[in-house]
Every structure is written in structure tokens, then in C-alpha cells.
Image (cartoon, rainbow, N blue to C red):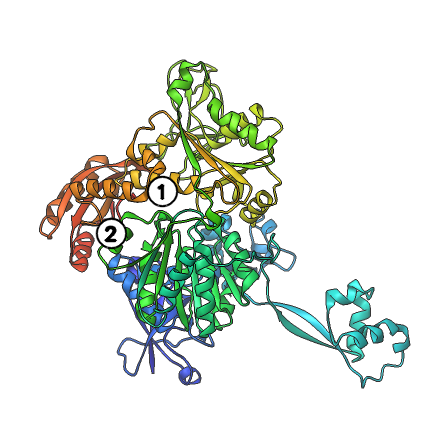
Amino acid sequence: MYAKVIIDIKHEDVNRFFDYIIPQKYEDFLERGMRVLVPFGKQTRMGYVTEIITESLDATKEILEVLDVIPSINEELFSLMNYIKNHVPALYSSIFSTVIPSELAVNYTKVVEMVKPELVPDDLKPYFNKKGIWRLKRKDQVYYPRLKKLRDSKDQEIIKIKTVIKEKGTTKTDKTYTYNQNHHYKRIYHYEIVIDLFNMKKEYTRKELTDQGLTASNINTLVKNQVLFEQEKDVFREIEHQFDLSDKKVVLTDEQQNVVNQIVNSLDKQETFLLKGITGSGKTEVYLEVISKVIEQNKQVLVLVPEITLVAQMAKRLKSRFDDVAIYHSALSSGERFDQYKKIQSGKASIVLGTRSAVFLPMEDLGLVIIDEEHDDSYIQKEQVIYDAVEIALERAKHHQIPVLLGSATPSITSMYEAMNNRFTLLELTKRPLNLEIPTIQYVDMRLELEKNNTSIFSKTLLDAMKKRIEMKEQTILLFNRKGYAPFVLCRACGDVPQCPHCDISLTYYKEKKSLKCHYCGYEKPFDNTCSVCNASKVKEVGTGIEYVEQVLKKQMPKARVLRMDKNATRIKGSHEIIWNNFLNEEADILLGTQMIAKGLDFPKVTLVGVLMADLLLKVPSYKSTENAYMLLAQVTGRSGRFYPGEAIIQGYDIGHFAIKSVNQTYETFYQEALYNRKLMNYPPFKNTSQILISGESYLKTYQRAFMLKKALSSLSCDVLGPSQALITKIKDYYRFTITLKYETIEKQELFDLLEAHEFDDIKIRYFPYLDIV
């Protein structure tokens, strides 16, 4: 018997299947989808079994070890990988690492051992420990060529180098102890506390015993004399939450109940529902009720949210009402993620809550997929292997023949178009429970504020409203969708703006770190107010970032308790939930944040939402800028007035645009206008669009290759636009050009073959199935 294996090396030269002999001891249980260790050249590598075959002319080496008891990749996952492979030109190994949790991968560590210490160079000796062992870290790789020469010395063996392979995900264990009633230890009278303890409880962990006053020496003595039996026990790493498990009691409105009934009546078939409910209309209550009906049928539910910020709120509602809820997202520790995955894989989770990557988790009895805030672009994986989690969810629904529930107050234009053309079933919630009104919206033209000599980033209207909320012990949410302290710094003497040396982009200023940073390649340098061009000490920040807004807010409202939520403020594990919980418990008056605070959050005491520089959202060079601007504004204003009457104040310098004005009207008003513009320009949903990025170190050569590719693409049945310079013309020292494709249908494999034929060592070509990612 033989196995076809994909090796976990991300390189085009090994992007194929390799045949291996299955040793007799593994023949009875090795299955497709299992992870194995195999010899590969001079290395040992992990691979994935994709097929078991009876004949092979290529297999010469045996599989060394099988890492799984049950397959890590089931048949459904294989079909999803095929779906991705047919839509994106990606390496097999990259697709495997996309759909499989990183905890199932392995770490390869080079370990160096001294054989003849006296012959090892003196400058290398400090790196070895007392036992003569050196575990190479990434920074130590610079020494590897010298170490290889020492290993390969012809005269005598000076050092040994071996590769240690360790799985990233490991099960945590703890020592537990039980009392042996039949022991013969004569000095037990010295340990009367032990007898008392085990009369109360049959089993204790080592920590529990030490907490009761026993020392490590005491425990070891009792084990040695067989008074206590010691054993290793698996420990499940529970996720620690900031919230308590209490849920509000809700009686569904007639409108909500009607929606629930329609979904429940279709639980046994594949159907896509689009739940369009105004902000605060109780979409979550609908989710919870439908989930309960699915669980009654002994089926599982997958719930996706677009941001980690929204996990805590949804987790509180789910865990307060249901047992066996698993949570999966990137902000968990590696151990927590591994345990959650094992819980899901074993079928012990009735409900799985997660962000984008959770769409690939193995759920054999899946009965429903819920995608909250379905309009959000965060569901699209934009790096490495590109995929849309919504599309993957729809594929899973086909496999299981189950419904998908897409929920949003502001459905994407494409989803709404599908619903209006009866490809999705449209469900609507048009009222807030308890007859609460939607917040009143007020627009402030900041040009008029300037005429009144107000140069602050806050209008008088917004500042007064925030002060009033503090007096009334109510809360405010402030949205400003720009990171950092200032977008860039500028020399006021010569006009020089510090640029990234590797990318065609200005460096962003971070005041807390006193540093300038490139968001594209990570280049960072200390801020210096002395200009590197003219040597004048006149370099100052220009524009406004969220850290600057926070500083001004605290200066103008010194008594206000302010929390900031953005990428920099949420780097520490659990910080999203801590900030959310603190604001929920009214430990702050104002929550200032970027787009991560704009959707899904429910704070009863928030009665004011302020939006700063709303028109900035329209300055993004994207065909979706108007849609994204409208949705962000509609979502964030909907955070106000969830329990008490609320208002929203939208500030800007160009607030006449229909996307901004539509926030005070209906979704349908915006949808019709946006759809008309899409049709004029042949954008989705009327035509599919994708983009090709061509990059290289030579500007002229890269453009020439891009132009040649355009001519070749003209043979396909699609509109070919470009090549044109990418929005960021240079990143990491590579010049970038884009070609845009517009089409109704296209033969993807023919396209991928064309792209591969035009790729050279010095020219990189990458295909993006969705526009606006480059």
C-alpha cells in the first residue's frame, strides 16, 4: 500500500504529490486526511495524506510516523480545499495551512551537540549550555554555515546537528492523586490531614494539596510509600471571561417570532436567508431562538462574527443560555485554541462561535450557519490564500443541505441584490422592541465651525452634547477611523515628509512610542524633530490620528473617563473583552475607537454617538467607498439609544454626499442610488471583478511585463483594464502595477495558466479574486 502526500513546504518546486510506502504496522488504520512524518531529501518533514493507493512506481521511502488517531482533514474539508484551489492559484501546502489550525502544524528546531568541545571555536562556545547543547533560534541562523562546516569536518566529528520535530499544539496535563486505603505505611499518623482531605474528596491535584499545607517532599514521600497513587490527567484550558453568565429575559415581538418561524420551517433544507433588521431591532434574539430549535434536533450551529471585538458580547449571550459553547479566534492563546479545536473535533461543542477562520472547523452534525454583520469586509481573507468566509459557509451549507442565516442592519449591495432577485430569502425587522425610536441624527459642517473661529476637532455641538451626557451619567461613543497620532510628519522649513525607504508611502507618527512607522512593511525609526534634508528643527505632525483625538479629548474634558479601542490598544490577550466589559459596567464615560467599535456592540447607557471627519471615509479610492462609508455610519449611529432616547452627531467638511445624507433616511434610498452607480460602471453585482498585481524590482521591466500580460489576457472573454500603477506604487522595494478584469464568467484554469506562463524569477504575479484588495 502507498500514500500520496503533500509536504508542508511552501515552494513551487515541491507543489505536487509525493508517493510513500505505508509500513505494514500502519496499513490497517492510516487514512486519507491524516498527518504523517516522512523522509524528504535529507530532512524529516510533516505531510498530509491525500490518497491511499495500491500501486506506485515512484515510492521508494517509507512513512516514518503517523501523528493522528483520526484524520485532521475530513472529506468536507477536502472539498472546501478543492473549491479554494479552483478559485485562487495557490500552493497545495498553503491551502492546507489555511484550512487547518496552526496548532496542528509542527515546529522544526535545529539542535547542535558538542562532540569535541576542545575543537569548537571559542566565540561559539557561550551559545552552548552546560550539557553542551545549543538549540538554534531564528536569530542564530547566521551561524549555521559555520556549524555545517564543523559537522562535515573530514578529520573528526566535532559537533552533531539534528532536527527536533515537535507539534505546536499540545495537551496540558496535571498530576492528580488518589488515596490508597490498603497502604501499609507505618508513619501515616504524621499525615492525619491527608486522611481528612481524602474523606472529603476522592481526587486532588498537586496544587490543591500544596494549598492545604502539604509540601512537595510530603507528597513525594506518600507516593513513594504507596499512600497516594499519582497519575497524569488531561487539563482543559478554559477561556477566562470578564463577564458574568447572566442573560436578559426577552419575549419576542410578533415580528421577531414570524422571522424565527420562517427559518425554523426550513431547517431541513438548503436555503440562504438575509435578515435585514434596523439597528437595535433584536437580530441577536432571533439568532438565539433559532439556535435553540437547532440544538433540540441534536444538530450543531456555527456562528461567525467579523471582528474579535464582537466575540465577548455574543459569547456572553450564548454561554448564559446554552451549554457546550466553543470559541475560536486568533486572540486566544495557542493552548486555548488547541483545546477548543479538540473539543469541536470530538463533537462536544453544540455551538461554535468564531471569526473568519472558524468557518473551516470540523463539524460533522452542522445544522445551521449564522453570519452576523454579513456586509463586513473582514470576512474576506486578504493575505496569503485569499477566500471569502461567506462563500465558504455557503459551500458548507450545500454539503450539509442546511440553511445559512446572513444578518445585518445594512446588507451588502450584492447580498441585497441577490435577495431582490429571489436567490436569497429576505426577512425584515423594521422596529425596535419596546417602541424605542431610532436615534435622531444631526449633521455639523466643520467649515462653518472654522468661520466661528473654532479650530478644534470637536464642534461646539458635539462637545456640549458630550458634557451633557456626563452630567446625566450616560455614555458616548466616538468614532474616528484613523490609526496613530498623526498620518505623517512634515518639515515646516523645506516641506520634506519622511518616507519609508522600501515603500512609496509616508511614515505614520506614533506619539506614545515617539516613532515613525510604515504600515506596509513594518519599517520603524525614532521620531526626530530635526529634518534630515535641511537640518532645521521644524519637523511636526500633520493631520489627525486617533491618539491625537484622545489627547485633545482629555484636555478639553479633563473629568471625562475615556477608553480607547483600536489596534494598538488591543494588542494584549483579552484586551478586547476587558475594554468592552469596562465600558459595559460604566467604568468610562466615552469610548473612542476606530471601525471596530462601529458594529454589533450593545451598551444600554449609550445615548450619544459622535463621528469625526465622516467625509474621510469617502476619500478611499475604491468603488466600494460609498457603500463602506454609509454602512459604517449607519452601524455606528445605531449604537445610540438602545435603552434610552439617543442621538448621533456626524461631523465633516463635505457632508452633502448621498452616502452620508442617506444615514438619516432609509437603507432602500441608499441601495437604489448605489445600485444605479454600480450598473453604470459594470461593478458587482452586475459583473464580477478581479485584479492582477505585477511587481518587480525594476520599474520599466515590471511595466513591460504587465503590458505583455494585458495583451495575452485579451484572448479571454473579459474586459481588461490597465496596466496602471497600484495605489501604493512601491512596497518592500518592489514596484507594483495592476490589471483589472471585469467579466460575467471566466475560465479560471485558463486564466491561471496564462498568469503562470508570464511569471519570471524577477517578476511576481499575484491574482486577487476580489477588487480593492491591492
* Up-down relation of residue 296 to residue 640 (above or below): below
Residue 637: x %, y % from top left = 43, 39
Residue 90 vs residue 353: left or right? left
**Residue type indicated by callout 1:** Met
Residue 506: x %, y % from top left = 38, 29
The numbered mark at residue 594 is: none
Q: How many marks?
A: 2
Residue ID for mark 1:
631
Q: Which quadrant: the C terminus?
A: top left
Residue 535: x %, y % from top left = 44, 15
SS under mark 1: helix
Task: Give the mark nearer the N terminus: 1 vs 2.
Answer: 2
Is 459 in front, or is 307?
459
**Residue type indicated by callout 2:** Tyr
Residue at the spot 44% in from the left edge and 19% down from the top edge: 531
**Which of the 4 quarters of the picture holds residue 50?**
bottom left
Residue 760: x %, y % from top left = 22, 49
**Which of the 4 quarters of the picture holds residue 393?**
bottom left
Q: CA distance from mark 1 to mark 2?
A: 16 Å
Q: Which quadrant: the N terminus?
A: bottom left
The numbered mark at residue 417 is: 2
Is 198 in front, or is 678?
678
Dot 2 alpha-carbon crowd within 10 angstroms: few under 14, some 14 to 19, many 20 or more: some
Does residue 143 appear in this view?
no
* Up-down relation of residue 717 to residue 555 (above or below): below
Residue at the spot 50% in from the left edge and 29% down from the top edge: 549
- Do residues under tags 1 and 2 come within 8 Å of each other at their CB atoms? no
**Which of the 4 quarters of the picture holds residue 294?**
bottom left
Is 354 in front, or is 421?
421
